[in-house]
Image (spheres, helix red, strand yellow):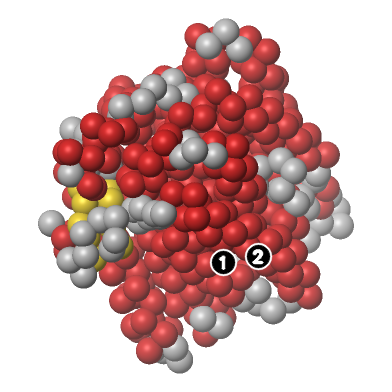
């Protein structure tokens, strides 16, 4: 059992080390990377099977009992996030075999990519807040290296903005960790959940919660801390942009859901309105930014920001249905958004540009590419029966049940503007005629074409599957939401059954 819990960390760690060892031999790096991604997905699926009934799996590193040692804790929410991480790692590993793969691998793509996956998996597996900070730093270092992989002026400019804001966020994170330890005497999640309601100075604890919200909000690109994302993501190569779009902001969202349903659940009345305000502002600013741009990468980047707002609704309302909606929406969005960035790369190969004003006519010459684009594009907008419809439906319904009618109205309006942005890409890239001075398609061979389109087809199929066979995915999301709200079960699994009785509070 202990080996299985360590596997999501151990596999990408070994992959990063081995691919670095063969730095000058890309032909050796690639099979190692593919095998590691497949193994990670397999290990994550095994963990999902073990936690599907609500079980919480725990192991203590070095045999140091919690809360004194390092705990690895996998519940259903963690397992879901690890599975989707493994899926994205495998999809992007295949896609990265496409055009310019040799140049990327020689620049260090494979070690940096698996180091990033290591940081993501560590964040989803850790059971204490200091190690969450450590995994954030691992992600930051690896992601900066990936962002400036091609060393262009545009990438360096975006990379500096990315690093500066994220360093400010992680500094605030570390400050919050120190203050939290001073107030509670512990950093273990379960122990924090047990002690936090008993802290005498609840005002100081709430201030620490706000610091953590800022730190996680910077990672999740919440309003007003999102400027780094559209400044950086559009400069990255498409495999890098796809894995960033899929996972980086979701780690911030995961941390918010984990900490504020576990440690600060007793302060839901205080943080709920804050989350609602931030969620609405994030949705609106993101979708408006997407509406004004005509570069595919910038449109998709701003939509990452917009959709994060939907994911915050669960924490704001703190009901099982709302949190289930957030989890289902996270899964849907990771698949769809990664696929759209992969498609953006395919569109550039077929047309020679990301600029919508310079391209066109794709529907006449590449109708299958048009169909592949429509699936995630319409899903992102929430069109039935695709996965995005069900995610938005559950989120909006939870708002209606909480009598937050204005929230439901704004969520619907943002969905309409999202559809407008997707239609804009469709009209410009596929429907209108190719401009006379438009660029020429980029050269690529059959192997590169297969590597590009294979993950796009698979992810598109998953979007349709989740949309048509929603029940098992919704059931898992509801089970994960109930596990998150059952704080006593988490505490008992980590600290023992006697400790859970001390956590009998009403969030």
Image: 324 above or below 494 = above
Q: Position of residue 72 (x, y in %)?
A: 28, 56
Residue 235 falls left or right of residue 346: right
Does residue 104 sit above or below 204 in this rendering?
A: below
- In this rendering, the count of numbered labels is 2
User: Of label 2 and label 1, which has the lower sequence position?
Assistant: 1
Q: Nearer the viewer, residue 63 or 165?
A: 63
Q: Quadrant of the C terminus?
A: top left
Secondary structure at numbered mark 2: helix
Point out residue 254 in the picture as x, y percentages from the top left corner.
46, 44
Point 83% across, 48% down: residue: 357
Could you tell me if the residues under marks 2 and 1 are in contact, i.e. CB atoms within 8 Å?
Answer: yes
Which residue is disc 2 drawn over? 167
Whether residue 247 is visible to the viewer of this picture, yes or no, is no
The image shows residue 151 at horizontal and vertical percentages of 69, 79
Name the residue rendered at 51%, 30% in the picture: 267
């Amino acid at each position: 059992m202990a080996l299985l819990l360590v596997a999501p960390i151990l596999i990408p760690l070994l992959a990063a080390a081995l691919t670095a060892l063969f730095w000058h031999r890309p032909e050796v790096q690639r099979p190692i990377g593919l095998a590691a991604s497949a193994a990670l997905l397999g290990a994550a699926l095994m963990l999902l099977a073990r936690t599907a009934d609500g079980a919480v799996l725990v192991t203590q590193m070095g045999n140091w009992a919690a809360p004194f040692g390092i705990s690895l804790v996998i519940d259903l929410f963690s397992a879901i996030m690890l599975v989707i991480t493994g899926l994205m790692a495998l999809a992007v590993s295949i896609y990265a075999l496409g055009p310019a793969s040799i140049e990327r691998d020689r620049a260090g793509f494979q070690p940096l990519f698996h180091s990033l996956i290591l940081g993501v998996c560590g964040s989803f597996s850790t059971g204490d807040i200091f190690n969450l900070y450590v995994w954030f730093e691992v992600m930051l270092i690896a992601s900066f290296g990936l962002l400036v992989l091609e060393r262009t002026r545009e990438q360096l400019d975006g990379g500096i903005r990315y690093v500066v804001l994220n360093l400010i966020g992680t500094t605030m994170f570390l400050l919050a960790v120190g203050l939290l330890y001073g107030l509670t005497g512990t950093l273990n999640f379960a122990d924090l959940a047990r002690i936090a309601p008993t802290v005498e100075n609840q005002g100081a604890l709430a201030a620490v919660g706000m610091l953590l919200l800022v730190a996680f909000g910077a990672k999740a690109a919440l309003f007003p801390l999102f400027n780094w994302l559209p400044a950086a993501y559009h400069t990255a190569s498409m495999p890098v942009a796809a894995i960033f779009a899929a996972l980086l902001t979701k780690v911030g969202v995961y941390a918010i859901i984990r900490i504020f349903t576990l440690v600060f659940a007793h302060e839901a009345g205080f943080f709920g309105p804050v989350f609602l305000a931030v969620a609405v502002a994030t949705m609106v600013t993101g979708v408006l930014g997407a509406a004004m741009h005509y570069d595919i990468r910038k449109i998709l980047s701003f939509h990452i920001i917009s959709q994060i707002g939907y994911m915050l609704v669960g924490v704001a309302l703190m009901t099982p249905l709302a949190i289930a909606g957030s989890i289902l929406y996270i899964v849907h969005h990771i698949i769809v958004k990664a696929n759209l960035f992969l498609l953006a790369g395919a569109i550039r190969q077929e047309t020679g540009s990301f600029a919508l004003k310079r391209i066109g006519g794709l529907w006449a010459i590449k109708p299958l590419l048009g169909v592949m684009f429509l699936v995630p594009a319409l899903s992102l907008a929430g069109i039935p029966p695709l996965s995005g419809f069900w995610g938005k439906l559950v989120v909006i319904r939870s708002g209606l049940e909480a009598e937050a009618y204005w929230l439901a109205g704004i969520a619907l309006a943002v969905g309409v503007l999202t559809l407008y942005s997707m239609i804009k890409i469709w009209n410009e890239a596929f429907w209108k005629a190719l401009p006379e001075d438009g660029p020429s398609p980029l050269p690529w061979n059959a192997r590169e074409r297969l590597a590009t389109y294979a993950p796009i087809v698979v992810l598109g199929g998953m979007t349709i599957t989740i949309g048509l066979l929603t029940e098992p995915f919704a059931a898992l999301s509801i089970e994960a939401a109930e596990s998150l709200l059952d704080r006593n079960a988490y505490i008992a699994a980590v600290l023992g059954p006697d400790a859970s009785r001390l956590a009998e509070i009403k969030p």
